Image (spheres, helix red, strand yellow):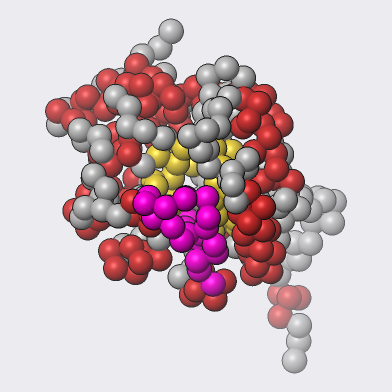
């Protein structure tokens, strides 16, 4: 049988070299294809940033304010999140399987708010993470805490398992009441997580010197929203963090405890993905809250 290719011109284009473009995320170029693909379900490939919606608080706090009914408070706004950070129990019981964003699974746990929080263990098997099709596993790391070594071993065990199966590991830097939340501590905690193999790191924003925290960490950093702030202040926090090197935010209470969670997460997206100034994002929030068409972005 004649070669079917003889009927048409061949397009080998030998004069055009095959391009090999670097992956868009900091420190991720040498990862496997599957792991990069999962990271692209967490971070937006165009902006290189993420808006993570965190509502895993119940794993030690129980039904905290705003999370009494996940089906009523969270599910209506998940379409606006790049990825969800949650527990396997809530994922199975409450999140529609039609959600196509990345899933970041809380993989450590143990004590409740009534006990010493730093005494955590790995609470999810790698088989379970694969079964749930997660993009990343999150583990709490207590640098300077009473159970620092155990939490570091939890991190390294998850890194080994995640790398074996192409699942990212998120190192979450916990800050105890006795620890100072300053750039020096954040540089230490984030760098340790990165050095030990975390694919990306979640930490807190500090006003003085955060750019050194981001520069000193060779993998992406996302910022925890922390305690509930007025909406304008939370948008300022998100803006300052990404402008000083953060690859996005992982907000919970500042979204689901907002006066209008849907409007708030959309305003946060404007800051993170479109570099909106905080005042413009707050105006956007107010317009959505009032049911008005969003105003044009200010210039100058």
Residue found at the far top of this picture: 300
Residue found at the far bottom of this picture: 1
Residue 282 vs 223, above or below: the answer is above
Residue 231 image-quadrant placement:
top left
Question: Could you say which is closer to the camera, residue 101 or residue 123?
Answer: 123
Residue 260 vs 33, above or below: the answer is above
Q: Is residue 91 left or right of residue 144?
A: left
Q: Main secondary structure of the magenta part?
A: loop
Would residue 159 be visible to someone looking at this image? no
Question: Could you say which is closer to the camera, residue 173 or residue 90?
Answer: 173
Residue found at the far right of this picture: 15
Q: Is residue 295 left or right of residue 249?
A: left
Question: Could you say which is closer to the camera, residue 224 or residue 188?
Answer: 188
Residue 94 vs 143, above or below: the answer is below
Quadrant where the C terminus is found in the figure: top left
Q: Write the residue at 67% across / 52% down.
A: 149
Tell me residue 261's x, y (percent).
25, 39
Residue 182 image-quadrant placement:
top right
Tell me residue 158's x, y (percent).
62, 62
Asked if residue 114 is among those painted magenta in the image, a careful observer would answer yes
Question: Could you say which is closer to the camera, residue 116 or residue 99?
Answer: 116
Q: Is residue 273 left or right of residue 191?
A: left
Which segment is the magenta one?
104-125
Quadrant where the N terminus is found in the figure: bottom right
Residue 91 vs 116, above or below: the answer is below
Q: Write the residue at 37% across / 51% down.
A: 114
Asked if residue 43 is among those painted magenta in the image, a careful observer would answer no
Would residue 3 be visible to someone looking at this image? yes
Tell me residue 278's x, y (percent).
38, 19
């Amino acid at each position: 049988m004649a070669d079917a290719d003889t009927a048409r011109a061949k397009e080998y284009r030998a004069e055009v070299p095959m391009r090999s473009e670097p992956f868009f995320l900091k420190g991720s170029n040498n990862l496997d294809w599957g792991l990069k693909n999962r990271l692209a379900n967490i971070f937006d490939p165009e902006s290189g940033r993420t808006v993570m919606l965190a509502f895993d608080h119940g794993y030690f706090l129980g039904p905290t304010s705003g999370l009494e009914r996940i089906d009523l408070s969270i599910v209506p706004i998940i379409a606006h999140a790049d990825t969800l950070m949650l527990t396997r129990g809530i994922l199975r019981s409450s999140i529609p399987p039609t959600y196509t964003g990345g899933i970041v699974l809380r993989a450590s746990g143990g004590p409740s708010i009534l006990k010493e929080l730093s005494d955590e263990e790995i609470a999810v098997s790698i088989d379970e993470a694969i079964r749930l099709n997660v993009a990343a596993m999150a583990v709490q790391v207590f640098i300077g805490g009473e159970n620092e070594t155990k939490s570091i071993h939890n991190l390294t065990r998850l890194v080994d398992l995640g790398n074996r199966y192409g699942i990212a590991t998120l190192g979450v830097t916990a800050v105890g009441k006795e620890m100072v939340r300053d750039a020096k501590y954040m540089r230490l905690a984030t760098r340790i997580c990165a050095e030990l193999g975390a694919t990306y790191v979640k930490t807190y924003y500090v006003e003085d010197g955060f750019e050194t925290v981001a520069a000193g960490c060779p993998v992406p950093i996302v910022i925890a929203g922390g305690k509930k702030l007025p909406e304008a202040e939370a948008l300022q926090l998100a803006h300052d963090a990404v402008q000083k090197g953060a690859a996005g935010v992982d907000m919970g209470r500042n979204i689901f405890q907002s006066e209008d969670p849907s409007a708030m997460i959309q305003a946060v997206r404007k800051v993170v993905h479109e570099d909106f100034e905080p005042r413009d994002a707050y105006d956007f929030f107010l317009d959505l809250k009032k049911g008005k068409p969003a105003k044009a972005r200010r210039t100058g």
